[in-house]
Amino acid sequence: MGEAKRRRQLAPRPVRTAADLSGDPSTVHVFGMGLGDEFFSSERGAWNVTRAKQLIAEGRGGEVYQLPFAPLWEACGHLEVDRAKLDRLRALGPRVWHEPLIHVVHGDPAPSGEDMVYLIDGVHRLNLWAELRRKGWAVDSVPSYVLDRAAERAIAVQIVRGDGVPIDANAFGDALL
């Protein structure tokens, strides 16, 4: 695939104009994803994890940082995980556990001036590291990619009704279950 085509594919995909939508509130339009793409959503937004991994594989995901474990666990330890997936990852061993987590810088900086960073891939690996800590292993930091705002815009997922009203990605996911 040519570089120009790849850039077009990874460009941010803003919500289309009302003319691009069906106008029917019973239809749903999803922008920023393809069939089979993996995504993560929270109350802060939704992101295409497949595209994030593609950016990283192309060397456009920045460098790997060692982020302190304790604040990550404090912020993300409450997130729901699939116990069967944890068992599968545990069986694969340390090579898989040590793959870097993926975070995005999203939104305006906090009142303190610090960037707001959200975990979009790796909560199961984070849980495995927590298990190792409970067993006495020294897990002080976790390898993590932190995608900047430009990359975050390129992987953002937007879900809207046909009449242009945005749909919360969490509510949309819950409605599909």
Image (cartoon, rainbow, N blue to C red):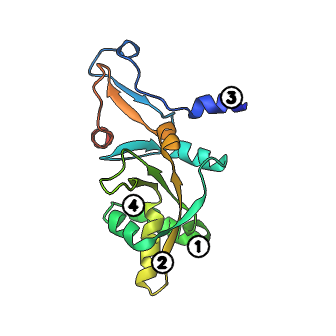
Mark nearer the N terminus (1 vs 3): 3
Nearer the viewer's eye, disc 4 or disc 2?
A: 2
Q: Decide if residue 1 is in sight here.
A: no
What is the total number of numbered labels drawn onto the structure image? 4
Label 4, on which residue?
82
Q: Residues within 10 Å of mark 1 (few under 14, many from 20)?
A: few
Q: CA distance from mark 4 to mark 1?
A: 19 Å
Label 3, on which residue?
4
Q: Residues within 10 Å of mark 4 (few under 14, many from 20)?
A: few
Label 1, on which residue?
94
Assign a secondary structure to mark 1. Answer: helix
**Label placed on residue 140:** 2
Mark nearer the N terminus (4 vs 2): 4
Q: Residues within 10 Å of mark 3 (few under 14, many from 20)?
A: few
Q: Mark 1 near mark 3, Cβ–Cβ under 8 Å?
A: no
Mark nearer the N terminus (3 vs 4): 3
Assign a secondary structure to mark 4. Answer: loop
Q: CA distance from mark 2 to mark 1?
A: 16 Å
Q: Amino acid at mark 2?
A: Asp
Q: Residue at x 38, y 12 (%)?
A: 19
The quarter of the rendered structure image containing the N terminus is: top right
